[in-house]
């Protein structure tokens, strides 16, 4: 017997299907949205409550080695936020780096159902798969890093795009990855040689190639393989005053790359708070010279349509910065003087990923301007389908602050209130105070559901409520015809902090914020199928390189089936056209 | 069932934190007859896995029942051990502790617990073994005797040739810092003998000198200021340095303060050069125990579930302290031998309370345990995942079948958990 | 037992043979041979009037234990070594100073010759601890 539910009288916001606040019924059968259900279906009358597809977070650091190191080295982060076990759920702790179960539960209670981990050192893939088994109630995916790997450099240097594409295909298959992540290409590697490489046209020590060439090579490889998700990109020179120039230069350098099957977007740019720092005209690149680059970047974004971007919105208060950009974290540590961890990762991230706890203060000049950047950007873009709300959890703030971010986007009143006590630079060095625009609920639904699903290439089943979609549904306890969110920002926060109901694959996960299920979701992996001769070649070449360069065997590199089978959802891709 | 006879290659050795994954075994029938590449400890582990197994006085099902009864009756359960079993067993153990509001601690509290405390003060610049082999031109072992405790550490990762260190024997310098001239000191390029208990002073002095401070003393911990200055110069002049440190640093006077100081020294050296560090993890999966505990509870060890959520406090919820206080009224011990490795006062309390002991082999703890359950050896008789000392996860393979009726730790723990749930209803 | 002792710092740690012996059987004679020993320099042994292999009694604030003496050619006077295991732990303190870690290294000890006395095996040692001796 199939399990059927019908949610009646919901006010539905479903941008992928062009639905903007219509009263509709949602029919669920066997975990899928269907046309109709029979009379035996369980009926829930939503009485006009707000309905959206389950939230899709395409960039949130939820598992893996650096999250683990961060948690372990910061007990003070979790102590004040204990989460007791309940009849249905396991215990744990929260705050900027919650324990695995609590991550799942907190997303559930906010109405999110899909979350992607955007930075996996591929050789540590096994650990992440294990951890995902203890991270319930979400569908997920992992984006392996390819940007500082000697194997990548080797193929770029040799001018062998097929080899590079095949290496990516091999890793995605053997480790189980959803896409390609690029972080400070070449720069992290250079740092292992003691070289501070932030110029995209500089030389990666010993390889006679530049970050620009690596970026282009990887971007081209993703398109030639035809991966569903484009290159997920964190450029060089992150977190430095004036780096908007580098960011734009790097985006320019890939603009001519042809999207697979004519697709428009070939890169997804991460976290504006750190990538588009401007500087006061005529000034230098000291922190005192910082100005928002949000508007300037929005103009570039509106003109150049080959990429999408996420906000990485700073939320103020405690955060933990963690990135594959080791040298950036070393730099940040010199500013904070507190804890700093660096994790060297063999051949793939020789310089290392870094972790530095950080508290953003609205009273601090730099932080307040950084806060203004993504908002200024998001409120000036002409296409919200390319602009994703995120906090780069836990880098700019924990994901639990999303409702606060929504309130800034949706309410000028809220922005004004927050800017009252803020450092004057936020006023003087951004145009934010003059921006009137307020995002609509429809735009919120685009930016937190439809668009990320599309950018990830998961739009067939995620991010919408049309027939055939997974029955991931979030219901919020509000009648949108009776409230004016822009005038009542507290109501925004209250509404989106805890869903009224969250369904994942048709199963109820949470009710009124209380999580009442703890079940494993799916983990996507992309399986690009290569032609046989290329597959044979890459296996041979990788065996040699891995056995020379790694400290463990080529044969022990793949993540065994036994850890993947219970969760894995394979996405086959026909990449046989990549020449051998 | 495992496949039949033949050569099995790329097997991971489940003994020490090196997790060497180049072991080649000859298997005839269900018998391992040869171990290629393994060190002498690895030989003993693989070739004698059948010997000296833990005796069970009834069926596993009966013993599981007994264990569950003890657990349900107890008011303050201590779950301990975990570092010599694979990750899935840890995850089951935490579930039991959570279910009954017990405490769970792993053996890192008596090995590299202080290292973790040090990182909680300062962070850590963590090294990787492949990087060490390729790049390190200066390697320091401090309070660690790898030739004995990690027999292939030097040959596989440090003396071996690397990409940028063409000749691992000539182009790389190895120092050993210790209170006594160990066998490792004998094969090093330089032995720095220090006074016992003076690690903290020496590291602090090195750091001060590295920062250009003038010290108004003639010697520190047995080393003259000149010697110390020379060490600092050499460390700064190294292109890529790695500090490996052992229990000589964590277990001696100063404990976590030693580590904190070392972390700060290594961090500072990154202004002039590249430096990172790595604890020489002893048991093959103690790093894994920290990792699994951290993702499930937020904390790497010393976790108490009494309030229904994890709380963390070394010194309170660490096994030795718990036992010395006489707090636990039952112990579930998994893959460890606390009776042999804890101080007398702790063992005395252990001997007076019901102990449930899961282990493949007999040991001192099994002598005093009330319930002994023999389990399969991870990485030989069952599969699983473990974490190398540098954080690399590796898959342990099942090579031969366990003795008849013997199950992996994870299965026994799952059975105990189910039985506890049943009894509690 | 001789009443003239030698003062030394007791330290412990792993040895290759102890590691190997653990895998051969933690209650067996091999293990006993590798962990129920105290390594010291030749001078110290001579000062005690002993030959290598004679039993010694190691006494600390926390207890005493009988082990077999052994010469370590690299050792110097002032430091003696017992491989980690039940014998070393029988004489180490249990105060962890709130870290979880007892003082395994650098305990001050007195070493006495104990010719003619018998080194307990693991089972006997455990019994002794349980009985609180
Ligand atoms: S060094 Fe350690 S892991 Fe390697 S073979 Fe020897 S005991 Fe096994
Ligand atoms: Zn990120």
Image (cartoon, coloured by chain):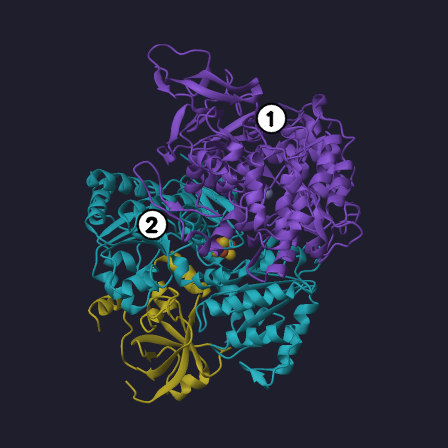
Residue A449, located in which quarter of the rendered image?
top right
Chain whose colour in the figure is purple: A
Report the disc number at residue B269: none
Q: Which residue is mark 1?
A: A454
Chain whose colour in the figure is cyan: B
Chain ID at mark 1: A
Residue A504 appears in the figure: yes
Is label 2 in a helix, a strand or a loop? loop
Percent x, y for residue C41? 46, 81
Chain ID at mark 2: B
Percent x, y for residue A437? 63, 33
Ligand 2: quadrant of the figure: top right
Image quadrant for the C terminus of chain C? bottom left
Residue B263, located in which quarter of the rendered image?
bottom right
Above or below: residue B360 compared with residue B201: above
User: Distance from label 2 to label 1 (Cα)?
Assistant: 51 Å
């Amino acid at each position: 017997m199939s399990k059927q539910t019908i949610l009646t009288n919901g006010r539905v916001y479903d941008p992928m299907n062009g639905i903007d606040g219509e009263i509709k019924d949602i029919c669920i059968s066997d975990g899928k949205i269907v046309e109709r259900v029979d009379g035996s279906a369980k009926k829930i009358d939503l009485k006009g409550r707000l309905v959206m597809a389950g939230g899709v977070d395409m960039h949130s650091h939820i598992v893996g080695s650096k999250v683990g190191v961060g948690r372990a080295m910061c007990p003070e982060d979790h102590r004040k936020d204990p989460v007791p076990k309940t009849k249905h759920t396991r215990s744990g702790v929260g705050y900027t780096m919650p324990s695995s179960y609590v991550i799942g539960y907190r997303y559930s209670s906010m109405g999110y159902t899909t979350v992607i981990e955007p930075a996996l050192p591929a050789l540590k893939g096994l650990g992440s798969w294990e951890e995902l088994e203890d991270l319930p109630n979400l569908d997920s995916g992992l984006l392996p890093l390819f940007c500082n790997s000697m194997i990548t450099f080797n193929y770029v240097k040799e001018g062998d795009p097929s080899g590079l594409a095949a290496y990516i295909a091999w890793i995605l298959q053997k480790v189980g990855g959803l896409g390609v992540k690029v972080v400070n290409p070449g720069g992290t590697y250079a740092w292992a040689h003691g070289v501070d490489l932030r110029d995209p046209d500089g030389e990666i020590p010993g390889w006679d190639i530049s970050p620009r060439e690596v970026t282009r090579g990887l971007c081209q490889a993703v398109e030639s393989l035809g991966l569903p998700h484009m290159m997920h990109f964190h450029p060089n020179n992150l977190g430095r005053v004036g780096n908007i120039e580098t960011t734009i230069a790097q985006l320019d350098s890939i603009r001519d790359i042809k999207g697979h099957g004519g697709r428009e977007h070939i890169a997804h740019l991460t976290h504006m708070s750190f990538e588009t720092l401007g500087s006061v005209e005529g000034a230098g690149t000291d922190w005192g010279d910082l100005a928002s680059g949000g508007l300037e970047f929005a103009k570039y974004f509106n003109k150049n349509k080959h990429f999408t971007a996420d906000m990485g919105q700073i939320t103020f208060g405690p955060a933990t910065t963690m990135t594959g950009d080791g040298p950036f974290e070393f730099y940040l540590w010199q500013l904070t003087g507190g804890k700093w961890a660096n994790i060297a990762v063999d051949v793939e991230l020789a310089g290392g990923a870094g972790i530095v706890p950080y508290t953003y203060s609205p009273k601090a000049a730099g932080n307040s301007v950084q806060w203004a950047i993504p908002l200024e950007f998001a409120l000036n873009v002409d296409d919200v389908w390319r602009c994703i709300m995120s906090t780069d959890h836990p880098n700019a703030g924990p994901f639990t602050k999303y409702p606060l971010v929504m309130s800034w986007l949706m309410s000028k009143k809220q922005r004004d209130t927050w800017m009252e006590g803020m450092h004057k630079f936020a006023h003087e060095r951004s145009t934010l105070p003059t921006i009137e625009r307020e995002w609509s609920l429809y735009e919120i639904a685009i930016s937190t559901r439809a668009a990320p699903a599309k950018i990830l290439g998961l739009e067939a089943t995620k991010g919408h409520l049309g027939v055939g979609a997974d029955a991931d549904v979030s219901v919020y306890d509000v009648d949108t015809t009776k409230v004016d969110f822009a005038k009542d920002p507290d109501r925004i926060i209250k509404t989106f902090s805890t869903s009224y109901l969250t369904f994942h694959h048709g199963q109820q996960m949470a009710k009124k914020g209380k999580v009442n299920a703890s079940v494993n979701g799916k983990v996507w992996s992309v399986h690009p199928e290569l032609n046989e001769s290329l597959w044979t070649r890459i296996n041979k070449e990788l065996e040699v390189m891995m056995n020379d360069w790694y400290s463990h065997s080529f044969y022990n590199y793949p993540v065994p089936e036994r850890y993947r089978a219970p969760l894995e959802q394979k996405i086959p891709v026909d990449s046989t056209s990549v020449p051998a | 069932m495992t496949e039949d006879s033949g050569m099995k290659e790329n097997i991971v050795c489940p003994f020490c934190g090196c997790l060497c994954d180049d072991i080649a075994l000859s298997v005839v029938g269900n018998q391992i007859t040869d171990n290629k590449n393994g060190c002498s400890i690895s030989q003993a582990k693989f070739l004698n896995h059948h010997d000296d197994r833990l005796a069970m006085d009834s069926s596993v099902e009966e013993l599981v029942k007994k264990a569950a009864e003890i657990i349900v009756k107890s008011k303050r359960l201590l779950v301990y051990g975990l570092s010599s079993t694979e990750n899935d067993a840890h995850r089951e153990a935490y579930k039991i502790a959570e279910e009954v509001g017990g405490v769970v601690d792993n053996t890192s509290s008596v090995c590299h617990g202080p290292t973790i405390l040090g990182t909680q003060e300062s962070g850590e610049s963590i090294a990787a073994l492949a990087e060490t082999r390729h790049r390190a031109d200066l390697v320091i072992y401090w309070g660690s005797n790898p030739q004995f405790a990690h027999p292939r550490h030097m040959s596989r990762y440090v003396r071996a040739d690397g990409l940028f260190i063409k000749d691992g024997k000539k182009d790389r310098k190895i120092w050993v810092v210790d209170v006594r001239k160990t066998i490792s000191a004998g094969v090093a390029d330089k032995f720095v003998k220090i006074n016992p208990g003076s690690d903290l002073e020496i590291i602090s002095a090195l750091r001060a000198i590295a920062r250009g401070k003038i010290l108004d003393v003639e010697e520190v911990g047995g080393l003259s200021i000149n010697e110390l200055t020379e060490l600092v110069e050499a460390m700064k002049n190294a292109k890529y340095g790695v500090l490996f440190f052992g229990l000589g640093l964590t277990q001696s006077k100063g404990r976590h303060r030693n580590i904190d100081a070392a972390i700060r020294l290594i961090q500072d050296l990154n202004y002039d050069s590249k430096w990172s560090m790595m604890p020489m993890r002893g048991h093959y999966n103690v790093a894994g125990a920290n990792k699994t505990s951290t993702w499930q509870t937020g904390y790497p060890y010393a976790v108490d579930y009494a309030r229904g959520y994890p709380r963390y406090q070394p010194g309170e919820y660490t096994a030795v302290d718990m036992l010395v206080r006489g707090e636990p009224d039952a112990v579930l011990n998994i893959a460890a031998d606390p009776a042999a490795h804890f101080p007398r006062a702790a063992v005395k309390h252990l001997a007076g309370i019901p102990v449930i002991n899961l282990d493949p082999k007999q040991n001192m703890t099994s002598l005093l345990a009330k319930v002994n359950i023999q389990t399969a050896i991870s990485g030989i008789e069952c599969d699983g995942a473990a974490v190398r000392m540098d954080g690399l996860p590796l898959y342990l393979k099942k090579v031969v079948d366990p003795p008849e009726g013997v199950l992996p730790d994870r299965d026994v723990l799952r059975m105990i958990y189910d039985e506890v749930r049943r009894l509690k209803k | 037992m001789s009443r003239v002792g030698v003062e030394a710092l007791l330290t412990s740690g792993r040895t290759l043979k102890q590691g190997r012996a653990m895998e051969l059987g933690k209650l067996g004679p091999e293990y006993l041979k590798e962990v129920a020993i105290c390594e010291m320099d030749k001078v110290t042994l001579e000062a005690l009037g002993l030959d290598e292999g004679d039993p010694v009694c190691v006494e600390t604030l926390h207890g005493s234990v009988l082990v077999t003496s052994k010469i370590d050619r690299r050792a110097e006077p002032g430091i003696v070594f017992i491989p980690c295991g039940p014998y070393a732990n029988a004489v180490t303190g249990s105060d962890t100073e709130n870290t979880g870690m007892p003082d395994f290294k650098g305990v001050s000890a007195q070493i006495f010759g104990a010719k003619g006395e018998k080194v307990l095996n693991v089972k006997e040692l455990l019994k002794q601890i349980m009985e609180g001796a």
